[in-house]
Amino acid sequence: MKHVLAALMALGLLSSIGCKDGSTIQGEEEAALTFAPNVPPPITRKHPTKVVVKLETSEVVKRLADGVEYTFWTFGGEVPGKFIRVREGDLVEFHLSNHPDSKMPHNIDLHAVTGAGGGAASSFTAPGHTSKFSFKAINPGLYVYHCATAPVGMHIANGMYGLILVEPKEGLPKVDKEYYVMQSEFYTKGKYGAPGLQPFSMRKALQEIPDYVVFNGSVGALAGDKAVGAEKGETVRMFVGNGGPNLVSSFHVIGEIFDNVYTEGGSVANHNVQTTLVPAGGSAIVEFKVDVPGTFILVDHSIFRAFNKGALGMLKVSGSEELEIYSGKQSDEIYLAEGGTIQEVEGKKPAPQVAKNKEDRIQFGERIYKQNCVACHQASGQGIEGAFPPLANSDFLNKSTRKSIEAVKNGLSGKIRVNGEEYNGVMPALGLSDEDIANVLTYVYNSWGNSGKVVSTGEVRAVSKDVGH
Ligand SMILES: [Cu+2]
């Protein structure tokens, strides 16, 4: 019997590799990899194959937020790394190249690997080298991969993570849209919004207090014109990962309910879920049908991360209204608490920064703008049609410094006209110091085509503070 087997092997008849489910590896192909938010197409093959994955690590300076840059360490030149899609039973031949300009060696630990280190030791690659190793994708699921070169935390904190999907052999149910969303945090020397090239802060990383929590590698990577889209009536699947390095994500889409959640990227689905936990180094697959049009906001529902640290994305759903499911606003009356016409945001005021010159004012003012104004007037001062007037090129702003100071100091309500459009909203008094108001207005006046004026603290002081009406 032994020599019969040997003879068959010699003939190459037994050289195909057996699979857990008995099927054999046939053929070879190179994996198509994609950058977030895109996902490679579903696998239609009915058999396992040898999949060649070629990934390159590189260290690149890119935008982390407006005016803020960071030296990212990447899989493929972007954060998160390229999405890899294989089929259960596939033999993955991994080629990891490290760009010759890299300063660090890198490697890869794929959570889809059954084997010591998830491939880390076998893939340790010096700059200008390529390593090769192979693994069998025996468990279906959505898995995180990351660099595991010492200091591991630093390689992950700098952006070295991505997702690999091992599609179950029967495939995933068909959907209309698939997207790749990965959360992670950045720890920078300067605070959130502090401009310039920001170095990594080991101290903050150890304390687990990030300055940035983002989707897809930077503030706004999934918002505005970078939002993902769908049409009313379509089904959407999001492959959600969390690179950490430290935080757990409470992933939520405002105004949607997940029909299915494959918790932790596994094979069992929960239904009708509002928020799902995505552990650091873990994942979830969420699916939902979009029944009504609108902009649906993706957040980490640890909510200060969303509105103050960047963990905010958008799904824009087009189509006609579905008033039976969602009526939209049915009435709008101004509600005024007793005594005042304008609400005041309470709270202890932080010590103001003292500006020495115009540049200081603009720099300090930018931070104040990002913390206090951006939610309504938007990042480039463009405002939101019908709700928040623009500050960019605003005739209202450029006509009267006094009125602008009054607006920020005391709030503003009632009909106003900005660039020919009428607004009738309420801007709250934000409780800023006179110094901060001078800085933020100087920033606004020196941005987006405005007049370039400097507002002094004295001018702000001269406008009396409205103490209730
Ligand atoms: Cu690395």
Image: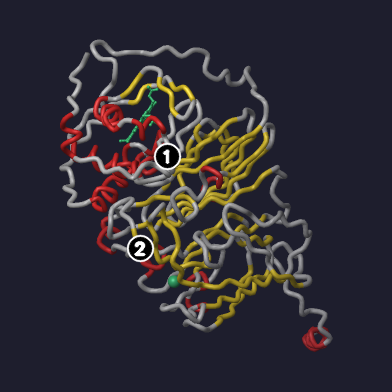
Question: Residue at the location (67% across, 55% down)?
Answer: 168
Q: Position of residue 416 (x, y in %)?
A: 40, 21
* Secondary structure of the residue carrying numbered label 2: strand
Left or right, 296 with reference to 15: left
Residue at image mark 2: 197
Q: State ligand 1's quadrant.
A: bottom left
Q: Position of residue 146 (x, y in %)?
A: 48, 65
Q: Which mark is residue 392?
A: none
Q: Nearer the viewer, mark 2 or mark 1?
A: 1
Q: Nearer the viewer, residue 32 or 260?
A: 32
Question: Residue at the location (49% across, 12% down)?
Answer: 331
Compared with 47, 120 (above or below) is below
In the image, what residue type sits under mark 1? Gly
Q: Earlier in the sequence, mark 2 or mark 1?
A: 2
Residue at image mark 1: 381
Left or right, 236 with reference to 28: left
Question: Residue at the location (29% across, 39% down)?
Answer: 441
Which of the 4 image quarters holds residue 246? Answer: bottom left
Q: How is the image coloured?
A: secondary structure
- Neighbour tally class for label 2: few under 14, some 14-19, many 20 plus, Cα within 10 Å: some
Question: Residue at the location (49% across, 72% down)?
Answer: 58
